[in-house]
Structure formats: C-alpha cells, structure tokens
Amino acid sequence: MTYANRELVKFAYWVPNVSGGLVISNIEQRTSWTIEYNRKLAQIAEASGFDYALSQIRFTAGYGAEFQHESVSFSHALLESTTTLRVIAAILPGPWNPTLAAKQIATINHLTNGRVAVNVVSGWFRGEFHAIGEHWLDHDERYRRSEEFIRALRGIWTQDNFTFSGDFYRFNNYSLKPKPIDPQPEIFQGGSSRAARDMASRVSDWYFTNGNTPEEIRKQVDDIQGKAKANGHSVKVGVNAFAIVRETEEEARAVLAEIIEKANPEAVNAFGHEVKNAGKSSPEGEGNWAKSSFEDLVQYNDGFRSNLIGTPRQVAERVVDLKRAGADLILLGFLHFQEEVEYFGKNVIPLIRELEADEGAAAVAAE
Ligand SMILES: Cc1cc2nc3c(=O)[nH]c(=O)nc-3n(C[C@H](O)[C@H](O)[C@H](O)COP(=O)(O)O)c2cc1C
C-alpha cells in the first residue's frame, strides 16, 4: 500500500539528556547532555521547524551513556524554555506506576498549554532492571504491563470514577482533578516485536520504530494499520533516522565511515548482545534489533538504515520515500545537534515541503 498525500510529515529530534551522544563511537560529537546545551537546542529546533523533541529514560550507565538526566523533569525544563515545541517524555512502567505518571503529566500539561506527550517504553536492558531492583518480566509480559499502563493513563485522563481491574494495576472510582486540558497528552510507544506492534494497533497514538528501509517500514505499517483498522483504532508511525547531511554525498559518506571506523567495538558488541537477547526472548524470537549488523548497532536505534545520509536533496527525497511507506514522523539524531538541527531546518525541510506540495498537486490533478 502507498500512504501518500496525508498531513505534512512531522519532525522530532532525540533530546541528548544522556551523555555520549547518539552513536557508540569515539568520533567528535559536539553535543552535550547539560541543561544549558539542551535549552538552546530546543529553541533552535522549534525555530527550525521541528514539531517534537523526544527525551530518553535510562537509570544506569549503558554503553557510552554514563550520565543520564531523568526524562520527565528534563522534558518539563525544555517546555519551559520554548513556546511551540512539543516534548515527549519517556516513561518506563515499573519504576513509574500509572497513578504518578498520570498526575505528573496532567500537571505539566496545565503548566505548558498541553505541549507534553509521553513515550511508554517497555525495557530491553536487563542489567538496568537488576541494578535498580526492578523485577525483569518476560518480553511479552512487559508489553502486557505497558498496555495496561496505557489503558490506565487514558482512563484516568478522560474518565471520572475510573475503575480498572488488570493483572498489574487496579483503580477504584478514581477521579483525577484537574484532568489534562486539550490537546490531550499524546501517547507514543517504542519497539518492533510482534507484541509491540499489536499493542500499537490497540492502544497507542503513535508507534515508534527503529531505522529501516522504506520497504521494511511499509511491511510494518501494513501490518499495524491493518490490525488497527480491525480494532477500530487509529495509530500514527514515527521512524528513527541518524541524519548526516552535507553539501556533497562524498562528505556525508566519509562522516559515516569515520563514525564506524572510530566505533568502540567492545561497547557496540555488548550493546548488541543485550538488545538481541531482549528480542530473542519474545515468542517469535525477534525484536527491534534482530537483523542489526555491527555497523547498524553503532547507532542505538539502527538510524543509519534509514539512509538519511547525503546531500539536502537526496535526504529530502528519502524522507518523502519513508512518508510514502507510511511514516508520519521522522525522529532524528545528529552528531552535532545544535548545528545540524539548524542546518536541517534551513536546507532540508523546505525541500521536503516542496516535494510534498508537488505530490499533493499531482494527486489533485489525478482525481
Ligand atoms: C524511538 C524509540 C525510543 C526509545 N526510548 C527508550 C528509552 O528512552 N529508554 C528505554 O529503556 N528504552 C527505549 N526504547 C526501547 C523500547 O521501549 C523497547 O524496549 C525496545 O525497542 C525493544 O522492543 P521490542 O522487543 O518490542 O523490539 C526506545 C525505542 C524506540 C524505537
């Protein structure tokens, strides 16, 4: 199926609230995890045409992520530094329960004119759960819990006397006051396993997936949209990409080659081992990183696979290809965030808007 002529494709960037940048490499990354750097980055992003920023939740050092600011409070700080940007706060069921998350996000929604959203993540890092004394549920049990978490969030935000009896959470005649104002907080989720896709087709507003080719993204989208339709649910799709946009394709490819050449093999292999194990324990034996090569794993979420590496025009065309495959949003990582977010906004987004306008005109002419 071709998913063309919808709304303009949206852009999000990964908030570097975790140290070490977005690639596991010793290449120079002019990116910082401090609040000062991030406040300025958020302001640059909203002035450059970005719609969303996505924060990360990490409780302990991963592979290169030695320092980690907490996602909800950090997201609130970025919202306070901006006026139109929406900030998606990552939330991990387990450490968060839905009662606190619903209350916390409802308050931030009031403080920021409804600009906060959440990304419910289900966990892949067993060592992290162990370090913080969190029970490590089986793969699909984690998604069963996340689905209850999302149903509870939505129920608390929209109903009075909310009553819910799940295997993980219970509510009895609970009325949250005040409830969020419109726009209601959007609920994103990350993960590509069977359980993740099925959850998206039932309860999430947005499905985030790792970087991939338009062909592979289309397969995921067909699967999810087919099921969502059968469930009477509507879900949008966000695709991860690590963008390297330079004046010539050679320059962009040379940067990718340097990232890989300077990768830290021990850290990349350890990360790969961890994430592949997390996916293998799903019933279908696959997950987000099932087909990731060493090179793919140098970027945490397979961002090179989306191939937004080249000149502004090449990258703009590839974004439109991803849109045709069903992507509603492109989630971007960069080596030097402040500089490259600005460059992307100035040199790539206008080309994408031109291409989208051409497609729209062609569709009208064909009607
Ligand atoms: C865009 C995106 C953002 C994510 N952010 C986080 C995060 O901040 N913290 C985290 O622990 N996991 C994060 N994850 C991991 C997922 O929640 C999930 O555990 C992982 O993708 C494995 O899912 P799967 O087994 O369904 O493939 C993210 C995933 C994606 C695609």
Image (cartoon, rainbow, N blue to C red):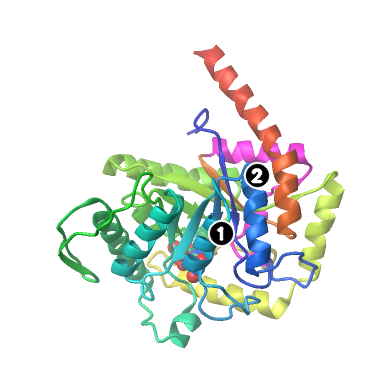
The earlier-in-sequence mark between 1 and 2 is: 2
Q: Secondary structure at mark 1?
A: helix
Q: Secondary structure at mark 2?
A: helix
The magenta region covers 298-325
Residue indicated by mark 2: 47
User: In this view of the protein, can residue 22 be seen by the observer?
Assistant: no
Residue indicated by mark 1: 78
| Picture residue at 27% right of the left edge, 63% below the top | 148
User: Given contact means CB atoms under 8 Å apart, are the residues at marks 1 and 2 in contact?
Assistant: no
- Locate residue 240, reporting x and y percent: 58, 53
| Picture residue at 53% right of the left edge, 15% below the top | 364
Q: Amino acid at mark 2?
A: Ala
Q: Is residue 64 above or below residue 198?
A: below
| Picture residue at 60% right of the left edge, 63% below the top | 292
Compared across the picture, whether 262 is left or right of 12 comes to right
- Locate residue 101, reporting x and y percent: 35, 66
| Picture residue at 55% right of the left edge, 64% below the top | 289
* Figure disc tally: 2
Residue 293 shown in magenta:
no
| Crowd class of label 2 (few under 14; some 14 to 19; many from 20; radius 10 Å) | some
Residue 301 shown in magenta:
yes
Residue 97 is drawn in which quadrant?
Answer: bottom left
